[in-house]
Amino acid sequence: MIAGQKDVGRFFRHSTIYALGNAVNRLGAFVLLPVYTHYLSVAEYGQLELFYVVASLAQGLLSVGIAHATLRFYFDYQEQADRNAVVSTNLIATLAIGGLGVLPIAIAAGPLARWVFQDGAMAPGILLILATVVLELATQVCLSYVRARERSMLYVGVAIGKLLVQVAVNVVLVTRFQAGVTGVLIGNLAAVGAGFVLLAVLVARECGLRFERAKLMPVLKYSLPFLWSTIIGVVGGNVDRLLVNGLLDLEALGLFALATKFAKLLSDLIGEPFGQAYGSFRYTIMEKGNAAELQARIMRYLMVGTCFCALGLLYFAGPVLRLIATPEYWEAERLLPVLVAAAVLRVVAYPTQTGIFWSKNTHHVFHINLLQAAVHAGGSLALIWAFGLPGACVAALVTSVVSIVAYHRFSQRYFPVRYDYPQLAAIAALTVGFHFSGLAASGHGFVIELAAKCVLLAGFLLFSWRVGLRADERNDLAALLRGRFGAGRLPEKPPGD
């Protein structure tokens, strides 16, 4: 077996399972989308998005990066007892920080509702959101433990359980009891709460409930730059929603939120599972001589896979939208191409951050998030004012470009990686060409359009296989796939081959 192929095989095995778990995690939102788009008006859907903005801001204030630090510091210890203490300490700290942190916001829920929604009656919804945030932050620490132990099947099981709870509660409340936006928020809280209870019991049984201040302080020192950078990142990431609502209206926000939800599928189905698998995987290979080569190779695989999924999303989102939503939602389709391009860049930016986190120079994250926030806020203000919703999409794309360039530049100082830029550019150009070919296939009847786009997707996969990957990478990937779906193990490579 060639050097690194076993590591790549392990990475692909777990990332595939995490992808399944994330698909299940996000499936609830799309299973329920026909319910939302039939029982909620576009304005109510925009109102729901404002609740999610409040949740993002609260989570940014309270997360402090402890979940990420749990994964990083877990591998700093060799003894399992010390590793368990890291997990339990961080879980207790997260619950304490979250519980105390939401109190001032909860007390001010009434005035906050009148400011954000121009309606004090929305205050109970803010309380539901705050409870969900606290449990979600604690859940992420528990999931860091699951990822560190590479128990990816457990991740999938928890995701399935949460999905069942979310769908059941939302369908009953929204359709039968006409609970509207409040019903959606209660369903989200029920799903997150169920997942937290299950994982907290697991962590308590396996790691105990020890709290060691000596283990928390290095975590907080490491995570402190995340606090300010996360706050800035969350504010910058949500400023477009606030500007769309302020400069346009709730209906426009509803359309933008729906288009963003479709584009976010790339992060949900590719970016997050990749990050969950690669986040721990990269720390296990950093001492190996071929770590940089492995990252460059995985970047090419990631680029091909992300662009393939992006094309599929662009090809089929429109027909799906027309099938599941009322006509007032269909205009969201025209916003997708630019938002999907921005999402592709956000996904492939993740490996470029490795040097920053490995060297623990997390202060760069603050600087990059500050830059992103400034670009996004300024670009959104100018472009939304000038061009409306399309301007918000362009601002998101510009911000993604700035982000990946900045992460790459800083990370290369600590972990130089020689990426094959011509191949990556060829994959991107191929994606753009196939996107425009898909536009030509539209409007010829549902069956013909579907068949044509499936052929185009197969063609993209074939071309990207030849253009985007080197010959040795194609051979290695084929061997990995044969090992996964064929004989059950990776074939040994003949000596001297």
Image: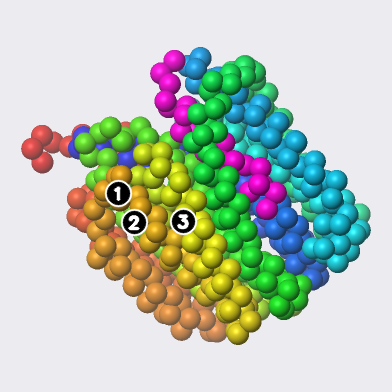
How far across and how far down the image is residue 345, in percent?
44, 62
Q: Amino acid at mark 2?
A: Arg
Front in this rendered view, residue 231 or 130: 231
The magenta span reads 57-79
Q: Nearer the viewer, residue 99 or 391?
A: 99
Q: Earlier in the sequence, mark 3 or mark 1?
A: 3
**Above or below, 489 relative to 59:** above
Give SS at disc 3.
helix
Q: Can you say which quadrant of the picture contains the C terminus? A: top left
Label 1 residue SS? loop
Labels 1 & 2 near each other (Cβ < 8 A): yes
Residue 73 within the magenta-colored segment of the rendering: yes
Q: State how far apart marks 1 and 2 are (Cα).
A: 7 Å
Q: Mark 3 or mark 2: which comes first in sequence? A: 3
Q: Is residue 79 left or right of residue 131?
A: left
Question: What is the three-letter code of the residue carrying label 3?
Answer: Ile
Residue type, mark 1 in image: Arg
Q: Are marks 3 and 1 in contact (CB under 8 Å)?
A: no
- The residue sitting at 42% across, 25% down in the picture is 76
Judge the density around disc 2: few (<14), some (14-19), many (≥20) Cα neighbours within 10 Å.
Answer: some
- Residue at the disc numbered 2: 409
Mark 3 lies on residue: 368
